[in-house]
Image (cartoon, helix red, strand yellow):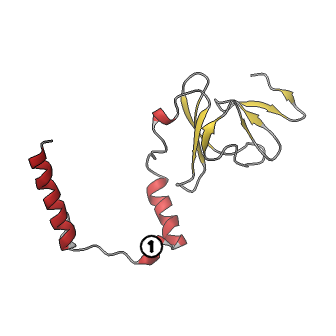
Amino acid sequence: MDKARQGQLMNRIDAHLDSGVDPMVDDIMRHPVVRYVDPEHLRLERARLFADYPLVVAHASDLRAPGDFVVDDLSGRSLLIVRGDDGVLRGFHNVCRHHAACVASGAGQAEALTCPYHGWSYQLDGALKSAPGMGRIEN
């Protein structure tokens, strides 16, 4: 973009900011502050927005190598996205089948996903790898 065009656009932005009016609407939109802190409003947003529509949790470039993972809790459900040993991205509910504890948090790199409660361990494709007292699991 040339400098003259950039200058025109910056002048328009400055004028809109100075006027206090969004050029996309007829009037200023106001939301009660309670919408940002009300648990019931959050519940409705999660139910109406995050439960029925696809969510962007991460970009594929954030999960390049096998074992790269990210956890997202925005929907109210803990979601785990992980790149498997075969290079495939997979999404799971971030819970252990045995105790329902989360098997991962935040983002990082793992060879397996292990429940902190009883130590059940899952492969990157979601298959049970091992559980204390059960020996190795053959698939």
Q: Within the image, what quadrant is residue 48 found in?
A: bottom left
Across and down, in percent, residue 8 comes to 10, 54
Q: Residue furthest right?
A: 133
The residue to which callout 1 is attached is 35
Q: Within the image, what quadrant is residue 49 found in?
A: bottom left
Across and down, in percent, residue 67 comes to 62, 30
Q: Can you say whether 89 is above or below 27 in the image?
A: above
Badge count: 1
Q: Quadrant of the C terminus?
A: top right
Residue 23 appears in view: no
Q: Secondary structure at mark 1?
A: helix
Q: Can you say whether 39 is above or below 59 in the image?
A: below
Q: Mark 1 belongs to which amino acid?
A: Arg
The residue under the point 70% across, 43% down is 103
Q: Within the image, what quadrant is residue 21 found in?
A: bottom left
The residue under the point 36% across, 75% down is 31
Across and down, in percent, residue 81 comes to 56, 39
